[in-house]
Amino acid sequence: MSPKESPDNPYSIQPDTLAMKDKAAKEGLETVWDRFQAQQPQCGFCELGLSCRICVMGPCRIDPFQEGPQRGVCGADADIVVARNLARMVAAGAASHSDHGRDLVETLLAVAEGKAPGYQLTDLAKLDRIAGEFGVAADLPPLAKAKELALALMEEFGIKKGYLGFTRRLPRARLEKWRKLGIEPRGIDWEISEMLHRTHMGVDNDPVNILLQALRAGLSDGWGGSMIATEVSDILFGTPKPAASQVNLGVLKTDEVNIILHGHNPLVSEMVVRAAQDPGLVNRAKELGASGINLAGLCCTGNEVLMRQGIPMAGNHLLQELAILTGAVEAMVVDYQCIMPSLGDLASCYHTLFFTTSAKAKFPKATALSFAPETGEALGRQIVAQAVENFVRRRPERVFIPVAPVAQVTGFSVEVIQEALGGTWEPLLDAIKAGHLRGAAGVVGCNNPRVVQDYGHTNLTQKLIAADILVLDTGCAAVAHAKAGLKVPEAADQAGPGLKAVCQALKIPPVLHMGSCVDNTRIVNLAAILANALGVDLDMLPVAAAAPEWYSEKAAAIACYAVASGVFTVLGVAPPVLGSKTVTDLLLNGLEAHLGAKFAVEPDPFQAARLIINHVEGKRRALGLDAR
Amino acid sequence: MSPKESPDNPYSIQPDTLAMKDKAAKEGLETVWDRFQAQQPQCGFCELGLSCRICVMGPCRIDPFQEGPQRGVCGADADIVVARNLARMVAAGAASHSDHGRDLVETLLAVAEGKAPGYQLTDLAKLDRIAGEFGVAADLPPLAKAKELALALMEEFGIKKGYLGFTRRLPRARLEKWRKLGIEPRGIDWEISEMLHRTHMGVDNDPVNILLQALRAGLSDGWGGSMIATEVSDILFGTPKPAASQVNLGVLKTDEVNIILHGHNPLVSEMVVRAAQDPGLVNRAKELGASGINLAGLCCTGNEVLMRQGIPMAGNHLLQELAILTGAVEAMVVDYQCIMPSLGDLASCYHTLFFTTSAKAKFPKATALSFAPETGEALGRQIVAQAVENFVRRRPERVFIPVAPVAQVTGFSVEVIQEALGGTWEPLLDAIKAGHLRGAAGVVGCNNPRVVQDYGHTNLTQKLIAADILVLDTGCAAVAHAKAGLKVPEAADQAGPGLKAVCQALKIPPVLHMGSCVDNTRIVNLAAILANALGVDLDMLPVAAAAPEWYSEKAAAIACYAVASGVFTVLGVAPPVLGSKTVTDLLLNGLEAHLGAKFAVEPDPFQAARLIINHVEGKRRALGLDAR
């Protein structure tokens, strides 16, 4: 697939998406694009961030044309209203990742206490390392060590200790910048709760002060909840290693029981993966006429099991409805986050079983099962068994799998990259210093029907690798890149000569898959490692980030911790802040003097690529390296 | 003041408010009613709870007339959208009280560690009791005990322990109801954070499940954050005792330096109270031509210093702008919550200094000072000193204090009520059993420009006491009742014969002031004590609650913990839920089978009184007591 300066249609660049959209239309089934269309025109006040529902003296609206009211009932002006609304988005995003991390920590504790049959400590070396970071005695046996670590990580959510433990990974200069601004993250839930308090009516009414706390809440995600989720998932299920796999709706099999794993948390999906290998269940599938049991991932649960178990990836965010429309899905298994409540309706139009697995996330027309560490293994078996029995209800005449799968190689944890480099960061740093590799960019984030699906991700990334910038990806962006064939070593041919040579030497793709959206912490963690190795702060590195098609509050939190960590971040969709010049200016300009990084908003991926290339070259120049 | 079946104007029943509104109009100054008017018509989607801004695929709107879209872009219907919006209101309210409680606990720890000069342990008996509740060794000296208690209370905010400690005050039957519903509150910030997670796009999409977690977040406020705030404030500053004081704008003095204490947290205001008694500062005031230094409260900071120090009360929520308009205020000192961002503009139109005292709450045109336990005492002195020096800038020709103050008696903590009853609850229970006292009602909450100021509170309360129902009040409602003359023993004449006799025997008013809005925990705590004494669950008591003029997210959280604790609660303003029949039905009906309590919405205070009287009599009947 080669870059195109403009998309062919307003929906997607992906053949599977377009084919399934046609099928939906023929069958009279509604998808996200139909609902997006039906919502047009969307409320301009809300889009600009100028509506306020924070108290019932309101709702209030600030007139962006300055003809109507310029203040809400309480007296809040556009700047205050916009800042509060954005801050609450960030708090909710941070809370989501935090709660995800909490579930992992609770399971780690249950494993340590022998209460989680089927779960185990898989990466003992990582257990040792992380336990060491949190001051757990090195000589404890693994289970005892895991228990102490779980209890120490629980303290990260509370208010008794100082600043978050993982922030010690950062250069001192970064922590000093945070201290000056008063945004060193304390307890994870504390920052979230304080953010909500500060945006209550009549509390914080200074847009700058509000946004600083929003950055802090974001940091409690990136160096707290999300990082805990990543590291504990690695301890429990193994740190990812490179594996060959496939992507797009073509990973579904016409002759097998297809089970889709969707959501964000690996706790249930790992048990489904295990159960799907059970000879008894496989045989039962064969008795019922299937050739086997086929698992496929969606969104970030998909990324979790892809990174660690090589499970193929059916698609990203906007594919979740379309996957059901293939008619080939025996069970859609979801945990939480980014799951469209429309899935139950669609599943009921097919034979698809729709299982929810978290008591925190129930859905219309779903079968609600409830994960607990004690019963997770049994839950995995139950799901696979029911999916297998459901195979006989599949109606072959309704099955339509529109494309053949595309190959991908994934599993690039920080540990794997270091290993590929021979155990030291020097070769990577040397390649950057020599200019073969100009720098690196994280291209991450969601899909959003405002953007032609995967157009933003794919074009931006192709431009970046052509400019010798290594791309690290996660989440839905990673799925887009894989579908475009960018995640195989042969894609090095699309890279510039320097990056191509590096890829060929290391036998890696020019776009490295680092995981799910909580795994954006792998990217900032790598940035911290490189900064420490170079003896500079993160904002001096020739690196950047982009979220070309983001849609969720979690993405807002991620963007905040990226920028607060010193990484220039380009958003492809404007957040709802344009109603306030103060807030917009602060995000686009004002932060840089204090954090060495800022946001940009650029919907066009080619322009976004230029911004990032210029940024990377500028940072090279500032480091005294050659710059183009 | 006698009840009137309809108000004379759409603004207020209070002469001071009306007079100051006229002054504002004459001087061309904008007040909350002007802004409320300018916002008309308010957005119908937002008022009904039918707009969603939870992700940037939106904003979305559900058409209440079922002609336009019935689902958001993600597929969420009206029930999901409304439930999520309400749940976030409750989470933000709980977070606000929680963060307030956290500030008290941090100061308690600082006091225990000798780092908070000027602060001390004032109520050692309460320290002993609360420390005992949290398992702190009884034989520790006070400071060591305070330290252990502070650390134990910090655990209440975290995730390591089981359920909130104060819930042990409740009858087992209540805890059992919560357990069945899965709403026993765990860590305070945990519940808030999980509520945000569950309302992220694609997480909880079951309105019942969402609302159950909202109740849980509310409980983490009532039996967590707010209760901690109340109890620790009592330990630090003394448990309230009855004191005679005054209320309304007439408490401001033409010949003294007037300092208004506004907000919710006593940490700074207690130090201002102390500094205002400093002979050096009083003498300086006299040197500058003032007769002395006069403190007055506003909103709940006002209630805090009124309850413990007898500081007169200038007014409730809608008076905050008008107080400045008297031209007699040398300094307006605010901490946080419910402070209108318009105050800075108004203060700058007069000589008034506008001091903010929390780093979490900055305001336009304010002088930002920042409280810390280490410097709180000095901060109090600094504020008073600057206010005194500002007296010379007052322009006497602009001073207008429109009314004479009204007397009130306040300070009815649970401890005081028990003491007044001779140390045992039997006389109160006997009065209820005999039917002299039919029951009790908490009339609490804010002001809201949607309601004629104080019309809801005052008329409801007058009807209730006339029906021999004892009224317990807090917050802005308490100020309304005081202005109506209902908080002096002589007001017993307005009570029915049974309540009148009880009041006369105990020399108490028929309306007992129990404090600020965090002190609603005193009311539920009293209900728990009475339920335990009678051996019944709280929902069997002849008690009810009302918030006739609520406006804030905190009020939504309070209402949730009241109902979840078993107390029938009548709201005078509809929450933004009417766009969902499911959510509305659940609140008005569905909860009762599980919690023994429910909400009602009734804007007319006379109808609300009838609802409460019928409820109380019904509960009497169910208990086998005489019923009217």
Image: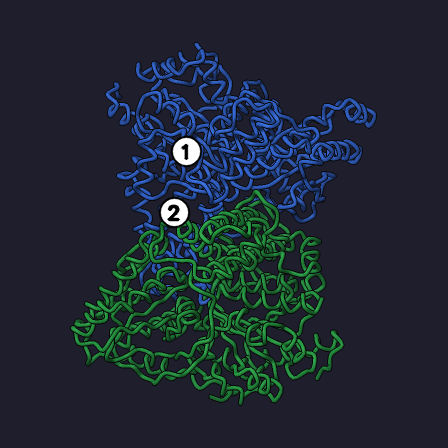
Chain colours: A blue, B green
- Kind of residue at badge 2: Gln
The residue sitting at the top extreme is A505
Give the side of residue A140 with respect to residue A210, left or right. right
Q: Nearer the viewer, residue A405 or A265?
A: A265
Percent coordinates x, y for residue A199 in the rendering: 42, 55
Residue beneath the point at 60% across and 52% down: B185
Residue beneath the point at 44% across and 46% down: A191
Point out which mark residue B574 bears: none
The residue sitting at the right extreme is A287
User: Within 10 Å of the Cα at label 1, are there few (<14), some (14-19), or many (20+) other Cα atoms?
Assistant: many
Residue A135 lies, with reference to residue B608, above or below; the image says above
State which quarter of the image contains the C terminus of chain B.
bottom right
User: Within 10 Å of the Cα at label 2, are there few (<14), some (14-19), or many (20+) other Cα atoms?
Assistant: many
Q: Are marks 2 and 1 in contact (CB under 8 Å)?
A: no
Q: Nearer the viewer, residue B23 or A398?
A: B23
Chain to which the residue tagged by mark 2 belongs: A
Same chain for mark 2 and mark 1? The answer is yes
**Can see residue A61?**
no
Cα–Cα span, label 2 and label 1: 17 Å
Judge depth for marks 2 and 1 and give the one in front.
1
Question: What kind of element bears circle 1?
Answer: helix
Question: What kind of element bears circle 2?
Answer: helix
Give the side of residue A487 with respect to residue B379, left or right. right
**Can see residue B564?**
yes
Percent coordinates x, y for residue B49 in the rendering: 53, 60
Q: Quadrant of residue B119?
A: bottom left
Point out which mark residue A167 bears: 1
Q: Can you identify the residue that label 2 sits on?
A: A213
| Dot 2 or dot 1, earlier in sequence | 1
Residue beneath the point at 33% across and 83% down: B19
